[in-house]
Image: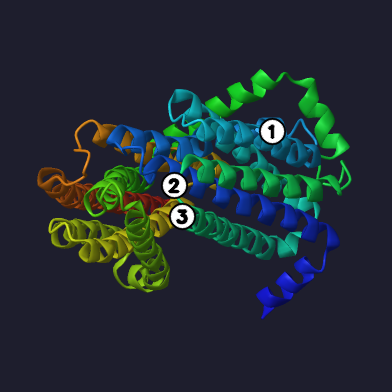
């Protein structure tokens, strides 16, 4: 009930409502834009979907978030965030319209992907500004509720935007003109987001004057260099904590293999299960597969807390990696669409369950002083390993995506990662126990020595 009361207080703040509306409109536009990109790159009847093109599209969607994210704070401490929200939306509009023009004329080469990456990269600055601005509008006691409401609603708005884009695509057809018009619609919604942001006072969202002046006295490149040094120090901090390092290693390997699985699924739905002239069937199949992953994520969130309470995070991570191996071997190797959806559901359970365990492990093992920097490293690894996997897989996978060898190797790799993780975890746990016992023995010896010394001094 306390959470409900907090949400009520938050939504009754007029300034929060404006910031919230800015986020929802922009998130809806993101969904429309991304749906149009997916439709154009993956499901245009006149265009072949190759592994290389699919990997490039995944890179365009994810790399701006992972590589630019840690450095955004440097600029947000120097610029008024209200202006960032307005100008970032304006820049997105220009870039999105540029991409729409390229699509209209049938371009899908390097310039097209550079335009898409630039638009999504600017969006990372926009999202960081939203997060940095929130504490200026909400009481500290209500921040958790405000963050939960904002991020969850933003995700829902993105899904809704993607649904809008998909419905327009089904209604108007799959040509370049349709994709360009959907992208142009996203520009209109970005404009609405900018208009709402413009109604707020330019000083409302910070940084405050006493924060702004010191930041502007230092060159921006000093701040960027500082971020790079922070990432290096966070990496060193992780390496001194075996459990944290093992957790990051497990999720990096999982994300790499999940990236390979994602590329396989996209190619199978586009080029194997659907024919070149039946791209709508491919889109529906991919939608069903993504729904399976989403359902698995929800189930993982429900069962993981109880599972870790009973068996511990190490055992549960190992079990989830083995679950992924079994899901691919049993439901992937037959290469049947219905079974693939079931396998995607189990992969969703595995992926989200591992992430929850790794999040918890890092929060427990990393000191508060380093926690923010460690999670920045975590964020970069989470996405770059995924994109790297797609790039590697693109060089070996067939255009259809059907490869018994690749699917079998993927299942075997998951099982191998599970065994390596379990072995290292057991080894480090034994070492830690030995160190703890040695420390306890040393402490006991010291106490007994002091006691003997004390007794000796009391003897006549």
Answer few, some or many: residues within 10 Å of disc 3's Cα (few below 14, many 20 plus, some between 14 and 19). Answer: few
Taking 163 as reference, is 405 left or right? left
Task: Write the residue at 75% across / 37% down.
Answer: 84
Q: Residue at x 80, y 28 (%)?
A: 214
Give the labeled residue for mark 1.
91
- Residue 241 seen anywhere in this rendered image of the structure: no
> Could you tell me which secondary element the residue under label 1 belongs to?
helix
Residue drawn at (78%, 59%) of the image:
16
Disc 1 + disc 3, Cβ < 8 Å: no
Q: Quadrant of residue 385?
A: top left
- Alpha-carbon span between mark 2 and mark 1: 23 Å
In front here: 103 or 312?
103
Looking at the picture, tell me which residue is in the foreground, 40 or 346.
40
Q: Is residue 60 left or right of residue 270?
A: right
Query: Helix, strand or loop at disc 3?
Result: helix
User: Mark 1 or 3 closer to N-term?
Assistant: 1
Q: Is residue 317 above or below residue 416?
A: below
Seen at 76% across and 45% down, the residue is 194
Number of residues whose C-alpha sits closer than 10 Å to that of mark 1, classed few (under 14), some (14–19) or many (20 or more): some
Left or right: 243 in relation to 379 = left
Q: Earlier in the sequence, mark 2 or mark 3?
A: 2
Give the residue pinned by disc 2: 39
Q: Residue furthest bottom?
A: 1
**Element assignment for label 2:** helix
Depth check: give the residue in front, 133 or 344: 344
Quarter-of-image position of residue 212: top right
Between 393 and 297, which is closer to the camera in this rendering? 393
Q: Nearer the viewer, mark 1 or mark 3?
A: 1
- Is 5 on the left-hand or right-hand side of 336? right
Q: Where does label 3 land, which residue?
A: 364
Residue 17 screen position, x and y as percent: 78, 61
């Amino acid at each position: 009930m306390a959470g409900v009361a907090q949400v009520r207080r938050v939504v009754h703040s007029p300034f929060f409502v404006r910031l919230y509306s800015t986020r929802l409109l922009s998130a809806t536009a993101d969904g429309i834009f991304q749906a149009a990109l997916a439709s154009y790159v993956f499901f245009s009847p006149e265009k072949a979907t190759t592994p290389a093109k699919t990997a490039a599209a995944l890179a365009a969607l994810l790399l701006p978030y992972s590589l630019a994210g840690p450095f955004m704070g440097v600029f947000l401490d120097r610029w008024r965030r209200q202006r960032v929200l307005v100008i970032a939306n304006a820049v997105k509009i220009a870039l999105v319209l540029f991409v729409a023009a390229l699509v209209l004329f049938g371009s899908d080469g390097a310039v097209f992907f550079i335009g898409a990456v630039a638009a999504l990269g600017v969006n990372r600055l926009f999202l960081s500004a939203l997060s940095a601005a929130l504490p200026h509008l909400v009481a500290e006691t209500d921040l958790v509720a405000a963050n939960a409401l904002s991020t969850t609603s933003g995700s829902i708005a993105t899904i809704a935007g993607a649904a809008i884009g998909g419905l327009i695509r089904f209604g108007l057809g799959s040509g370049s003109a349709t994709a360009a018009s959907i992208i142009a619609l996203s520009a209109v919604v970005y404009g609405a987001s900018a208009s709402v942001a413009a109604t707020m006072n330019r000083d409302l969202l910070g940084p405050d004057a006493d924060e702004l002046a010191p930041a502007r006295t230092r060159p921006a490149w000093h701040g960027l260099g500082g971020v790079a040094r922070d990432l290096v120090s966070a990496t060193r901090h992780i390496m001194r904590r075996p459990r944290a390092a093992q957790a990051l290693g497990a999720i990096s390997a999982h994300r790499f293999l999940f990236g390979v699985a994602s590329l396989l699924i996209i190619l199978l739905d586009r080029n194997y299960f659907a024919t070149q002239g039946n791209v709508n069937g491919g889109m529906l199949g991919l939608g069903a597969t993504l729904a399976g992953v989403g359902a698995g994520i929800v189930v993982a969130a429900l069962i993981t807390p109880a599972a870790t309470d009973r068996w511990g995070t190490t055992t549960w991570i190992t079990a989830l990696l083995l679950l992924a191996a079994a899901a691919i071997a049993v439901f992937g190797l037959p290469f049947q669409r219905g079974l693939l959806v079931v396998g995607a559901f189990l992969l969703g359970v595995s992926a989200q369950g591992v992430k929850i365990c790794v999040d918890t492990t890092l929060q427990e093992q990393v000191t508060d002083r380093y926690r923010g920097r460690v999670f920045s490293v975590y964020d970069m690894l989470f996405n770059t390993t995924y994109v790297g996997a797609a790039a590697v897989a693109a060089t070996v996978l067939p255009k259809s995506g059907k490869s018994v060898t690749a699917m079998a190797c993927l299942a075997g790799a998951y099982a191998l990662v599970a065994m390596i993780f379990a072995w290292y975890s057991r080894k480090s746990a034994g070492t830690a126990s030995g160190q703890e016992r040695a420390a306890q023995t040393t402490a006991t010896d010291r106490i007994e020595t002091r006691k003997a010394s004390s007794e000796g001094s009391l003897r006549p």
